Amino acid sequence: MKDSALDDLWVVIPAFNEGAVIADVVRDIRQFCPNVVLVDDGSRDDTAEHARSAGAIVLRHPINLGQGAALQTGIEFAVRNRAVYVATFDADGQHDVHDLAPMIELLKERNLDVVLGSRFIGKTVGMTFSRRLLLRAAVLFTRLTTGMNLTDAHNGLRVFTRKGIANISLVHNRMAHASEILEQIAQNRLAYAEFGNTVRYTEYSRAKGQKASNAVNIVVDLVLGRISK
């Protein structure tokens, strides 16, 4: 059954070369939520065409700027279109659309600004040991730098209220944006909670996923960002 709260939700999907799966991702979301905006971040394949045919509004960066930049573009578009809630959602099919309605319900019940997905209090399928170690390290880094007592730090599934998303302004274009979002939640004292969501790793999503070596790049981006402030 469709949840009426999802009519007020805009789902933002950053995507780069996801033509193989993006139509299914968009169709799954649009069974429950009509407002899907996909930001095609300079893809070299047919991501935009497949997303548009599945019913998404498609915005396009002419060159690849990075996931953080794509999220910021989509967030700004959703806010201009008077979104009551804004969700971020990964393009590779690893998230479950059925988590969106209970996340909004948690926002309303506890008068929160943001609900953050956590695979570690939820369910994971197909996670590799190396991925688990990397994500645990990211959690430790986040606790040390933000003081937030989280169980997951780089989960792409998040739901914000309009007030909450107004406090998020991303300047880290690439993968460091995930830590930047959490820093801004802490700095702006937004009311938050975690929700145990489902993350399914397939052969496709593991191949597309972030390499462990990129963790160094994330830390460098964050440090340089702190120095420049």
Image (tube, rainbow, N blue to C red):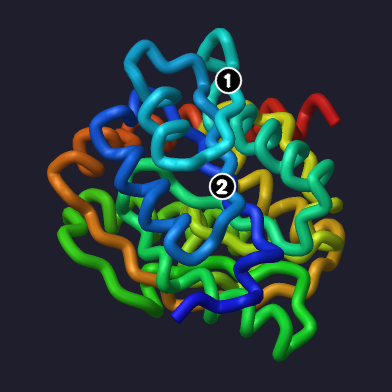
Q: Nearer the viewer, residue 93 or 154?
A: 93
Q: In the rendered structure, which amino acid carries the disc numbered 1? A: Arg
Residue at 69% x, 31% y is 73
Residue at 49% x, 15% y is 42
Q: Is residue 219 visible?
A: no
Q: Where is 167 relative to 203, above or below?
A: below
Residue at 79% x, 40% y is 169
Residue 134: which numbered mark, if any? Answer: none
Q: Where is 203 relative to 60, above or below?
A: below
Q: Quadrant of residue 188?
A: bottom right
> Crowding at label 2, few (<14), some or many (≥20) Cα neighbours within 10 Å?
many
Image quarter where the N terminus lies is bottom left
Tell me if 64 is positioned left or right of 169 in this view.
left
Image quarter where the C terminus lies is top right
Residue 111 drawn at (x, y percent): 79, 83
Q: Where is 109 relative to 213, above or below?
A: below
Residue 93 drawn at (x, y percent): 31, 49
Give how far apart the Cα atoms at labels 1 and 2 are.
14 Å
Q: In the rendered structure, which amino acid carries the disc numbered 2? A: Val
Residue 162 drawn at (x, y percent): 81, 60
Q: Quadrant of residue 132?
A: bottom left
Question: Which element type, helix, strand or loop, lies under badge 2?
Answer: strand
Q: Where is 22 relative to 8, above or below?
A: above
Residue at 42% x, 64% y is 97
Tell me if 136 is positioned left or right of 156 in this view.
left
Tell me if 125 is positioned left or right of 184 in this view.
left
Residue 36: which numbered mark, if any? Answer: 2
Q: Nearer the viewer, residue 135 or 77?
A: 77
Q: Please name the residue that numbered disc 1 is placed on.
A: 60
> Crowding at label 1, few (<14), some or many (≥20) Cα neighbours within 10 Å?
some
For the residues bearing labels 1 and 2, Cβ distance under 8 angstroms: no
Q: Is residue 222 visible?
A: yes
